[in-house]
Amino acid sequence: MTDTRFAPSPSGPLHLGHAYSAVIAQELAVRSGGQLRLRIDDIDGNRSQQDHVDTALADLAWLGVPWVTPLWRQSDHLTSYAAALDLLVAAGLAYPCFCTRSDIAASATAPHGPSGAVYPGTCRNLSAGKRAERMAGSAWCWRIDMASAAREAGRLTAISNGTAAHFDAAPHGDVVIARKDAPTSYHLASTVDDAAMGIGLVVRGADLLAATAVHVLLQKLLALPTPDYHHHGLVCGPGGVRLAKRDHPASLAVMRAAGGDGRELAAALRVHKLPAGYSLAKA
């Protein structure tokens, strides 16, 4: 019995790509005798809106995709993320960073990694006194000390799409694990939540395959279980362009309002059939 999860961010309407991910996650859960859990990734207080949560629930009901209630809201679990961060800080595996995005972009020593520009480590070796001085007057985020964390964690392995795979988080560099404007980050919150929710199989798009290395690393550092992973292909619109929340015609709410049959759409998505004009990129 394996539970899966669908984790939309309430910053915009769901589209056909979200529907595909939710349907596949629910289908894989059912095959194992498990259930689909619904998580609302609402740690971004500036962009998260309850209207988008309500619309997402209506979209899933229209598709006929059931989920376990009550739903899981990340905003209800900030203390859990803070506790995980405290463990990493206490172990000497995280440090405060005061750099702005423009500081990092202007750095000639910032290479490119799987998630974009790799942080050059400007704040990593600040003295305790300098850190205390900066923390008294500046905002900061928390970054993982990737070199130290990689040594601590050792070899990273997980089942990915049914096969044992080796992951390397080092190319991501010192990623942010708690933002300046939020007490956590996607990486840390998602890792903590998957363990707390008892998720045995994480189903998500192939665009998040690289991030899996960071999550497996955090699981080892925090002594959390490592779930299996299934990374599916991404739904693309005309010209093979990946869908985005701004793609109005692909919005589930628009399809629903136009009188579309959500259960019929879900049945087609379960066998990887997409409406005319859409395609599925290989994972």
Image: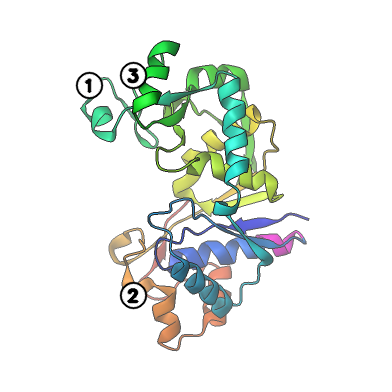
* Residue sitting at x 29%, y 32%: 100
* Residue sitting at x 61%, y 72%: 65
Residue 75 in the image: state x and y as whole percent: 54, 53
For residue 165, say whether it is visible. no
Gap in Å between the C-alphas at discs 1 and 3?
12 Å
| Labels 1, 3: front one | 3
Residue 158 is covered by the magenta coloring: no
Q: What residue does disc 3 label?
A: 122
Q: Which amino acid does label 1 sit on?
A: Ala
Marks 2,3: beta carbons within 8 A: no
The quadrant of the picture occupied by the N terminus is bottom right
Count neighbours of disc 2 (C-alpha within 10 A) and say few if under 14, some if 14 to 19, many if 20 or more. Answer: few
Q: Which amino acid does label 2 sit on?
A: Pro
Circle 3 sits in a helix, a strand or a loop, which is it? loop
| Labels 2, 1: front one | 1
Circle 1 sits in a helix, a strand or a loop, which is it? loop
Residue 86 in the image: state x and y as whole percent: 59, 29
* Residue sitting at x 55%, y 43%: 189
Residue that extends furthest to the front in the rendered view of this protein: 136
Q: What residue does disc 1 label?
A: 108
Gap in Å between the C-alphas at discs 2 and 3?
44 Å
- Tag on residue 249? 2
For residue 100, say whether it is visible. yes
Residue 228 in the image: state x and y as whole percent: 66, 45
Q: Give the residues in magenta.
A: 28-32
Q: Which of marks 1 and 3 is nearer the N terminus?
A: 1
Q: Which of marks 2 and 3 is nearer the N terminus?
A: 3
What secondary structure prevails in the magenta region?
Answer: helix
Which sits in the foreground, 177 or 83?
83
Circle 2 sits in a helix, a strand or a loop, which is it? helix
